[in-house]
Image (spheres, rainbow, N blue to C red):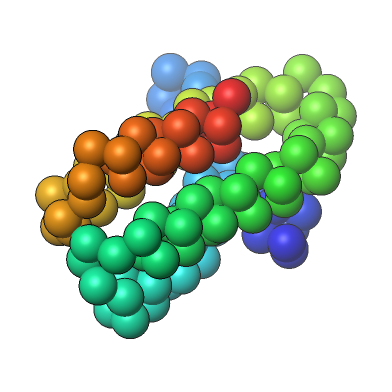
Amino acid sequence: SAHYRGDHSKYQSKDGRLTTSLCEDVFSVAAVQLTTIRERLSKKSDALVMAICLVFSMMRSKQIHARNGFLQDLETCCAASNDFSRMSEKCEEVLQDLFDECEFTEDAIATLEASSNELLS
C-alpha cells in the first residue's frame, strides 16, 4: 500500500521525539474500511469479525513488506519506533471502540484480540 511506502510528513516534538504521519495516514484508510464494514454487517455477525481480522491481516502484510524503508538511518529508525508505538495505541483504541459498539461473543473477542496482537507483534 502506498500509505506505508509513501513520503510521510516528519515531525519533531519539543522534547526531541521523532515521528512521521505514518500512523495517521494508515489509520485514516483503515478507519474508512472499518466504518464501511460495520455499516454493512450485523454487529454480532461472524462475517464482521472475519472482515476486521482481514483488515488487520492486510495491514500487517503491508507493514512487513514496507519495513525496510523505515530503517534507513538512526532518525528514520527512531521515527519508525515512535510511529509503530502510536499505531499500537491507535489499534487498541479501534478495538475498544469495536468492543463497545458491537455485540461480540467471547470467542469473537478472543479472535479479534489475537488478530490485533499479530498485527502489533
**Residue 80 locus on image (x, y percent):** 65, 30
Of 103 and 15, which appears nearest the observer? 103
Placement of 14 over or under 11, stated as above or below: above
**Residue 69 locus on image (x, y percent):** 83, 39
Q: Name the quadrant of the C terminus.
A: top right
Tell me how many marks there are: 0
Residue at (81% x, 28% y) in the render: 71
Placement of 81 over or under 100, stated as above or below: above
Residue at (35% x, 34% y) in the render: 110
- Whether residue 34 can be seen here: no
Residue at (22% x, 62% y) in the render: 44
| Residue 42 location, quadrant | bottom left
> Is residue 34 shown left or right of residue 38?
right
> Is residue 84 shown left or right of residue 78?
left
**Residue 31 locus on image (x, y percent):** 40, 63
Placement of 55 over or under 88, stated as above or below: below
Of 40 and 10, which appears nearest the observer? 40
- Whether residue 108 can be seen here: yes
Of 52 and 26, which appears nearest the observer? 52
Placement of 56 over or under 86, stated as above or below: below
**Residue 38 locus on image (x, y percent):** 30, 70
Residue at (39% x, 42% y) in the render: 112
> Is residue 98 shown left or right of residue 18?
left
Of 112 and 3, which appears nearest the observer? 112
Q: Name the quadrant of the N terminus.
A: bottom right
| Residue 65 location, quadrant | top right
